[in-house]
């Protein structure tokens, strides 16, 4: 309680789930958890790729890092061999370069690594942790915690294989999962476009955060839509056991933004694009690559830059504050420059922005706090809660601060999910629960979604296929756990596990002094009616949704704290 997230007393945990490394679709995930340097509360970040399965094949379900090294080190794991190695020659290198160097040091191209870049080394609050193939544990500044421990990377080589409880039923069950995901009508678009298709969708429904959430409609969205993106697309790319291949591999062949590698997905496209008023797609691809190399979260980076741009627009920041830079909306070169200044803490202004928008605003004051689009200190993702009320509530109550993935409410986004709405929520709350711009019954939706979502995360499975598209549900989880681990478990027991996880996250935050007052949204979403698009005139009426959510959670409506009766029912007291 009360410790500094960057002190040696903080603990950094890497974990995989019981399905990680199996053949089930998207069973590639791992989680990093610690106290959050942005919020001072619970922090976690998730990623796919191949590192999680490799850790599982080495025989480990998790790694717990305590204390702090006096000098830069990296952790090398090869099955039962675990070494803490000198990272003097890796410190200062960018992420991909450092991971390539470790392969050479150990003469093994099959090594999988997770690493921080200069941003983590410099304790920037935007710092992420990245895998060899570019999947990023980005949120909650987990890379900052890793940097505070002087831990450059964790390299893993596993050769042990996995034990399957019921091998005779295993492949049959895996095939059922694959068939269900592939048969869902939403899957085709995700395979074809990845999450880049969301630019077109969000623009059409007024949910594309623009110029620091001043609008949900971007006047130059046509320049970054799917058809434009395809001009740079080389191929799709998949994580371990992934059938949706939502990753992109792109090439900008020439010019000042020349780059080739992992392509940006929706969140990055908006964070470094419309959110900063930027419609130069080539620059977004280039800056996205900078973020990966320096090890910064694109959401937190873009959010910080767009906050600074609005403060400059409103005269709160001047050239005296910005080291002489003119912060203009849509200036792609400036966004690239600020990205590097943040990661390296270059100059007075770079050093300020490296604290993240919330902490930077607290330092300078002058009314700048009003324009930080955060929850509990963490930047909001590119999900406009005013245009989808369920997302507004999801952001407000999420444990790690603003978080579109903790509950991941998507079933009210369109009629394509009418079948799943009835399966997940029943008919009692229809039709309002499926209406994007209605606050009614969203408390139940977020309660339900969080319980399922954290179970999926704990299993080590990606939410694409389980929640988007919602092709798999509790009965599928039950069969997977049976054939893989031999666990006999019911839907009610899984839901209780989900509730326990959410309540434990909540108790962590309550211990750190958080309450209902922290379950809120930026003033812009609560008081400023949307200026255009489908949600024109709408604000988020949060209190009525919070009351219903707390009721289902069994939390005190005045304080937001779990009541004793609820904790006892979950075996937490």
Image (cartoon, rainbow, N blue to C red):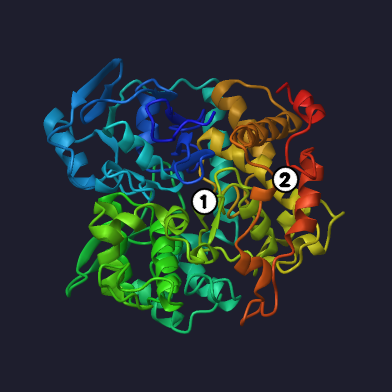
| Up-down relation of residue 528 to residue 236 (above or below) | below
515 or 194: which is nearer to us? 515
260 or 385: which is nearer to us? 385
- Please indicate whether residue 231 sits to the left or right of residue 570 in the image: left
Q: Earlier in the sequence, mark 1 or mark 2?
A: 1
SS class, disc 2: helix
Residue 354 visible, this angle = yes
185 or 412: which is nearer to us? 412
Local crowd size for mark 2, using a 10 Å CA cut-off: few (<14), some (14–19), many (≥20): many
Task: Classify the position of the N terminus by image quarter.
Answer: top right
- Please indicate whether residue 347 sits to the left or right of residue 220 in the image: left
| Residue pointed to by mark 2 | 448
SS class, disc 1: loop
Local crowd size for mark 1, using a 10 Å CA cut-off: few (<14), some (14–19), many (≥20): many
**Where residue 290 appears, x then y in whole percent?**
26, 58
**Where residue 138 appears, x then y in whole percent?**
41, 48
Q: Residue furthest top?
A: 80
Q: Which mark is residue 377?
A: 1
**Where residue 199 appears, x then y in whole percent?**
48, 71
Which residue is found at the position 44% from the left and 66% from the top? 307
Q: Which mark is residue 347?
A: none
- The answer to the question of whether label 1 and label 2 lie on touching residues, with beta carbons closer than 8 A, is no
Residue 113 position by quadrant: top left
**Where residue 324 appears, x then y in whole percent?**
25, 72
Which residue is found at the position 50% from the left and 36% from the top? 460
């Amino acid at each position: 309680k009360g410790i500094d997230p960057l002190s040696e007393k903080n603990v950094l945990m890497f974990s995989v789930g019981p399905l990680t490394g199996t053949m089930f679709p998207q069973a590639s995930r791992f989680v990093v958890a610690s106290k959050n340097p942005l919020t001072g509360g619970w922090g976690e970040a998730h990623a796919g790729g191949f590192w999680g399965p490799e850790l599982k094949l080495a025989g480990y379900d998790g790694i717990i890092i305590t204390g702090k090294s006096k000098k830069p080190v990296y952790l090398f794991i090869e099955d039962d061999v675990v070494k803490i190695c000198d990272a003097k020659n890796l410190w200062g290198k960018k992420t991909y370069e450092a991971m390539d160097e470790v392969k050479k040091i150990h003469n093994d191209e099959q090594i999988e690594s997770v690493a921080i870049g200069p941003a983590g080394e410099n304790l920037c609050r935007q710092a992420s942790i990245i895998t060899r193939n570019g999947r990023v544990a980005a949120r909650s500044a987990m890379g900052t915690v890793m940097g505070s421990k002087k831990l450059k990377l964790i390299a893993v080589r596993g050769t042990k294989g996995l034990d399957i409880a019921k091998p005779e039923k295993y492949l049959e069950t895996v095939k059922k999962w694959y068939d269900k995901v592939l048969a869902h009508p939403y899957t085709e678009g995700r395979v074809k476009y990845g999450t880049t298709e969301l630019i077109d969708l969000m623009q059409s429904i007024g949910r594309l955060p623009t110029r620091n959430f001043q609008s949900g409609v971007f006047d130059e969205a046509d320049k970054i839509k799917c058809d434009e993106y395809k001009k740079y697309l080389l191929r799709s790319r998949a994580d371990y056991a992934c059938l949706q291949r939502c990753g992109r591999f792109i090439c900008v062949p020439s010019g000042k933004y020349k780059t080739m590698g992992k392509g940006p997905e929706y969140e990055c496209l908006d964070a470094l694009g419309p959110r900063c008023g930027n419609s130069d797609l080539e620059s977004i691809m280039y800056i996205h690559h900078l973020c990966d190399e320096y090890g910064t979260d694109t959401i937190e980076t873009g959010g910080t830059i767009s906050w600074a741009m609005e403060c400059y627009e409103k005269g709160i920041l001047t050239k005296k504050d910005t080291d002489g830079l003119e912060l203009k909306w849509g200036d792609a070169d400036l966004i690239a420059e600020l990205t590097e200044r943040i990661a390296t803490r270059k100059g007075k202004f770079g050093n300020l922005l490296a604290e993240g928008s919330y902490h930077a605003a607290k330092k300078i004051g002058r009314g700048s706090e009003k324009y930080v689009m955060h929850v509990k200190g963490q930047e909001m993702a590119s999900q406009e809660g005013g245009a989808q009320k369920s997302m507004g509530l999801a952001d407000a109550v999420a444990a790690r601060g603003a978080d579109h993935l903790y509950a991941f409410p998507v079933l009210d986004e369109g009629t394509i999910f009418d079948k799943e709405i009835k399966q997940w929520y029943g008919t009692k709350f229809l039709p309002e629960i499926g209406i994007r711009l209605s606050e009614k019954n969203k408390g139940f939706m977020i309660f339900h979604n969080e319980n399922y979502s954290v179970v999926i995360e704990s299993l080590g499975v990606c939410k694409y296929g389980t929640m988007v598209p919602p092709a798999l549900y509790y009965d599928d989880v039950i069969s997977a756990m049976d054939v893989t681990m031999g666990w006999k478990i019911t839907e009610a027991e899984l839901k209780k596990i989900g509730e326990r996880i959410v309540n434990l996250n909540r108790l962590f935050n309550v211990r750190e002094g958080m309450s209902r007052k922290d379950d809120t949204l930026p003033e812009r979403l609560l008081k400023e009616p949307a200026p255009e698009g489908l949600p024109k005139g709408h604000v988020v009426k949060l209190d009525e949704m919070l009351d219903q959510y707390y009721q289902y959670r069994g939390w005190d409506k005045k304080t937001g704290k779990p009541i004793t009766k609820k904790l006892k029912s979950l075996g937490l007291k």
